[in-house]
Amino acid sequence: MPAAKDIKITKITKSKINDLDWNNLPFGKYFTDYMLEADYANGEWVSVAIKPYQPLTLDPALTALHYGQSIFEGIKAYNNVDGETYIFRPHENLIRFNKSADRMCMPEVPEWLFIDGMRQLIELEKQWIPNKENHALYVRPFMFSTDALLGVRPSLTYKFMILLSPTGPYFAAPMKIFVEEKYTRAAPGGVGFSKNAGNYGGSLRAATEAQKMGYDQVLWTDAHEHKWLQEVGMMNVFFLIDNKAITPSLEEGTILKGVTRDSVITVLNDLGISVEERPINIDELVQAYESGRLQEVFGTGTAATIALIQELFYNGKQMLFDVQQCEIANKVKNILNEVRYGLLPDTHNWLVKV
């Protein structure tokens, strides 16, 4: 069986790092010198290599392009105050990655390839980690089918890769969110819980229409009544009502089980704030707002970390929030950042050292 120590490394001739404007790092635009690549064939992972970042040569009949067998994850790596490099909760991403793979009829990626391969890749690229507040090295593992066949069936071959991208915050400013009542992201029995490419492709129309109206993203609702709240674009969502944090339940399988979501729940519990994971109806939310009990709304995700929400718009009603008064969201964000940067102890063993 292959192991992480067997990963072949092909060195670059010249680094791109000096060409980067470190004061301007939009999310996901720039990539480091190296990438990890592996192929799945005949039931095993082969040709595992770390090589210079480069284009791929793909067959036009590639099944991923025609039938959408493609999944991914998002992870971040940080330098702490002592200059040590850590990855935030990658094992949770591996678990979710393989759940997505199972739902999409794709092979499991073993820990030695996903975790140890990632550590080796980041070790090579540590100098690309920005040492600025709210910046990090974004890690993108992904897998797609590679059979060249125009037939609707699970592929027999796959490619797994990891890319690295130095990046700033995804949402630098508080967000304005449109509650979606027309389009549907996910339904029970579907693939809403998996991080597959089709979920994001299918979300673009609603997001584009919302942006034309001046909103940043949509808050998805259920497929049947368009009343039960799900998630915001690429984020899970939390509502602080009567000093209690409420986040939509995962039970129906329509919502992504966010690693940041889970981390936020843990921090809220540490702070003594009650958390309810349950179905929540938009009418309940409107009533809480009108009675002055809806105190804060915020999103959570790897890209955004904690994204403050300053406005929700639903059925002609504008719900506004003073983000300067969002004490709980800001406190949770600060705690997570301080753990990542080594300013607070990692009491939950979330950090994996490179």
Image (cartoon, grey):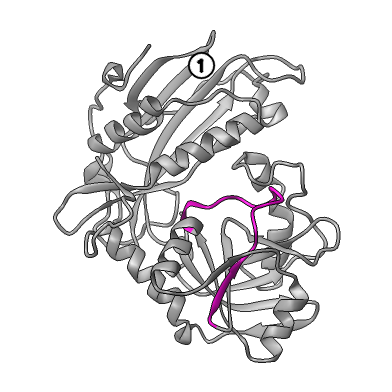
Could you tell me which residue is drawn at 71 percent across and 72 percent down?
A: 213
> Where's residue 140, x and y in %?
44, 41
The relative height of residue 137 versus residue 135 in the rendered view (above or below) is above
Q: Is residue 155 magenta?
A: no
Q: Residues within 10 Å of mark 1 (few under 14, many from 20)?
A: many
The three-letter amino acid code for the residue at tag 1 is Tyr
The answer to whether residue 178 is left or right of residue 138 is right
Main secondary structure along the magenta-highlighted residues: loop
Of 230 and 310, the residue lying toward us: 230
> Where's residue 19, x and y in %?
28, 47
> For the N terminus, which image quadrant?
top left
Could you tell me which residue is drawn at 27 percent across and 31 percent down?
A: 120
The answer to whether residue 153 is left or right of residue 224 is left
Could you tell me which residue is drawn at 27 percent across and 50 percent down?
A: 129
Q: Secondary structure at mark 1?
A: strand
Could you tell me which residue is drawn at 56 percent across and 59 percent down?
A: 235
> Where's residue 325, x and y in %?
47, 87
Disc 1: which residue: 40
Residue 18 appears in the picture as rendered: no
Marker count (numbered):
1
Q: Quadrant of residue 42?
A: top right
What range is drawn magenta here? 243-260
Of 129 and 190, the residue lying toward us: 190
Residue 236 appears in the picture as rendered: yes
> For the C terminus, which image quadrant?
top left
The relative height of residue 65 versus residue 323 in the rendered view (above or below) is above
Among all residues in the image, which is located at the extreme right? 224
> Where's residue 94, x and y in %?
46, 37
The relative height of residue 193 versus residue 46 in the rendered view (above or below) is below
Q: Is residue 248 magenta?
A: yes
